[in-house]
Amino acid sequence: METTATAIKIEKIKTSKISQVDFDNLAFGSVFTDHMLVCDYKNGAWQTPEIMPYQAISLEPSAKIFHYGQSIFEGMKAYKDDHGDAFLFRPSDNHRRLNISANRMCIPEIPKAYFMDGLKELINLDKDWIPQKDGSSLYIRPFIFASGKGFHASPADEYKFLICLAPSGAYFSGKVKVLIEETYSRSANGGVGFAKTGGNYAGQFFPTQLAVKEGYNQVIWTDDNTHENIEEAGAMNIFIRINDTLITAPTSDRILDGITRKSILEIAQAEGIRTEVRKITVPEVVEAAKNGSLKEMFGAGTAAVVSPIAAFGYRGTDYDLPELTDSYASRFKKIITDIQYNRSEDPFGWRQKV
Ligand SMILES: *Cc1c(COP(=O)(O)O)cnc(C)c1O
């Protein structure tokens, strides 16, 4: 057992599993590295974080996570450059957002040092697991859940904060066909849509399955009240390009404040691309599709960076988007990944060496 400067207990695995992994065929988030970080919250305080071999954890059947869904998570990545150095992208923003989610779900905030030092220590230990192939990366999943026991519907008194790492191959979403959803809602005014909390995603599975049965890959979420305003693309933020203007919905308590979304907005500004952060309605997009001014729609999120939409369905009609050779989506993807993989300057100060 070792102890680091920031008092993280480290128990190393005896024999690494890395030689058993086929790095050329990595399904997203299905293979895990040798180690994980675990930190317990009890007696009103976060205890010393521990890094240990990746393993199952045991919980009381009455643990509140199982009954009341008190759980939050983050999604981020570590990237390796040609020299083998490892980098994170805007990691402080993930920490900040985890605590925003924590507050909404009555989960105690995780101190920044525990998050950042624990993350860096863990990544350094499992650095060999960061794939070096272009587009591949190490997906990072920090999460907190209620481990405290009892059937009473109230916040738990004990929590666990974990970080697990999953090497992942390049994310090719292919041609995504989406359905504009008018029956189900992802989130509501005053709800928890802005938090990365488990139930938000469980609630998406059923409407998404219905859309898949109809031949679509994903749903486009509209606002719960009127179903007129376009808000998100599955578990990604959405951008719509009409002529040369890039439009995205303003964040609210219904919309997740994505780090990819805000990075794209900053890059667009630097590139002189006109952006509008405003409500955008389905009729406006349908009209633009009909008159040819609709140029692009794409999702934005950490996993895929950008996920171009090839067509959208609305009230029984499918509308195709044009195939562009020099799309905004591919421009943003190149600029962002060049920064992430240390292939370009980082004028925004987003890249952080591990
Ligand atoms: C995580 C997430 C996003 C994207 O956030 P990033 O920080 O860009 O990864 C967008 N929408 C939803 C609903 C999300 O859960």
Image (cartoon, grey):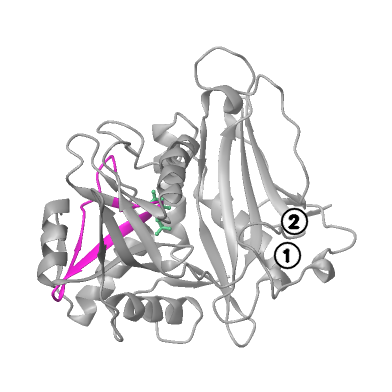
Q: Residue at x 63, y 28 (%)?
A: 147
Q: Secondary structure at mark 2?
A: strand
In the image, is residue 343 above or below residue 67? Answer: below
Considering only vertical position in the picture, is 72 above or below 171?
A: above
Q: How many marks?
A: 2
Is 19 left or right of 250, judged from the image as shown?
A: right
Q: Nearer the viewer, residue 115 or 195?
A: 195
Q: Residue at x 18, y 77 (%)?
A: 273
- Say which mark, if any, is on residue 125: 1
Read off the magenta span.
232-254
Residue 157 visible in the displayed image: no
Q: Is residue 14 left or right of residue 119?
A: right
Quarter of the view holding residue 195: top left
Q: Residues within 10 Å of mark 2 (few under 14, many from 20)?
A: many
The residue type indicated by label 1 comes to Leu
Report if the beta carbon of the residue with label 1 is closer than 8 angstroms to ligand 1: no
Residue 262 visible in this rendered orientation of the protein:
yes
Q: Secondary structure at mark 1?
A: helix
Query: What residue is at 69 percent from the left and 71 percent from the top?
Result: 25
Image quadrant where residue 291 sits: bottom left
Could you say which disc has been placed on residue 35 in the image? 2
* Rendering coords of residue 91 (x, y %): 47, 61
Residue closer to the observer: 307 or 110? 307
Name the spot of residue 319 as percent of width and height, x first. 24, 63
The structure residue drawn at horizontal position 14% and vertical position 55%, both measured from the top left corner, is 278
Instruction: Look at the image and tell me in which quarter the C terminus lies.
Output: bottom right
